Amino acid sequence: MKIRVYVTILTVLLIWGCKDIKPVFEINPREVKTDTIIAGEQRAYHFKIFNRGSKDLIIEDYVAGCECTQINLFRNQKVSSNDSIPLNIIISTKKEEANKLKEVECTFKTNATPTFYNIALKFYIKQGN
């Protein structure tokens, strides 16, 4: 009987001790396949940012690797525990960029671990009519 009580107490302590008390940054979709955009047009990519942790996630800052990229998100954006927010990334192309394969990386700085998170968007810019 005493052994059962000790095992139960140890099990509860182990489970409680393993709970993550930090924010956990997750994005969906995780990968974006190579896309084709007609030169001179825009393309919007839609994501959801999830906080899978038990503490508020703060997206402190972000940067896009190209001037052609607009990230629709507020700096210091808060995402509550087990909640999500939409993330829209808009790519604008120029007509003179036709027939190029391009990759744009977006980096997010958060209070989660790891602190920095990257998304890479690959697309081919096709000549329009």
Image (cartoon, rainbow, N blue to C red):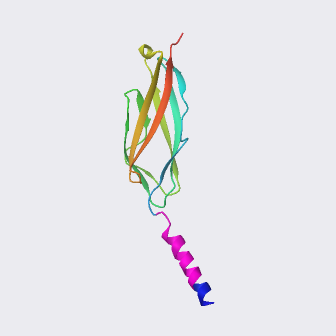
Where's residue 11, x and y in %? 56, 76
| Residue positioned 52% across, 53% down in the render | 83
| Residue found 51% across the figure and 71% down from its top | 16
Above or below, 78 relative to 20: above
Between 65 and 50, the residue placed more toward the observer is 65
Residue 54 sits above or below residue 16 on the image? above
Q: x, y percentage for residue 105?
A: 42, 34
Q: Residue furthest bottom?
A: 1
Measuring from the top left, give residue 75's x and y in whole percent: 37, 44
Q: Is residue 43 left or right of residue 68?
A: right
- Magenta-highlighted residues: 6-20
Check if residue 33 falls in the magenta segment: no
Residue 66's image quarter? top left
**Residue most toward the right?**
1
Quadrant of the frame with the N terminus: bottom right
The prevailing secondary structure element of the residues shown in magenta is helix
Task: In the displayed orientation, state which residue is furthest to the front.
Answer: 3
User: In this figure, what is the number of numbered marks?
Assistant: 0
In which quarter of the view is residue 35 placed?
Answer: top right
User: With respect to residue 30, does 22 lie above or below?
Assistant: below
**Residue at 42% across / 30% down in the picture?**
69
Q: Quadrant of the C terminus?
A: top right
Q: What x and y, as percent, mark residue 14?
A: 52, 73
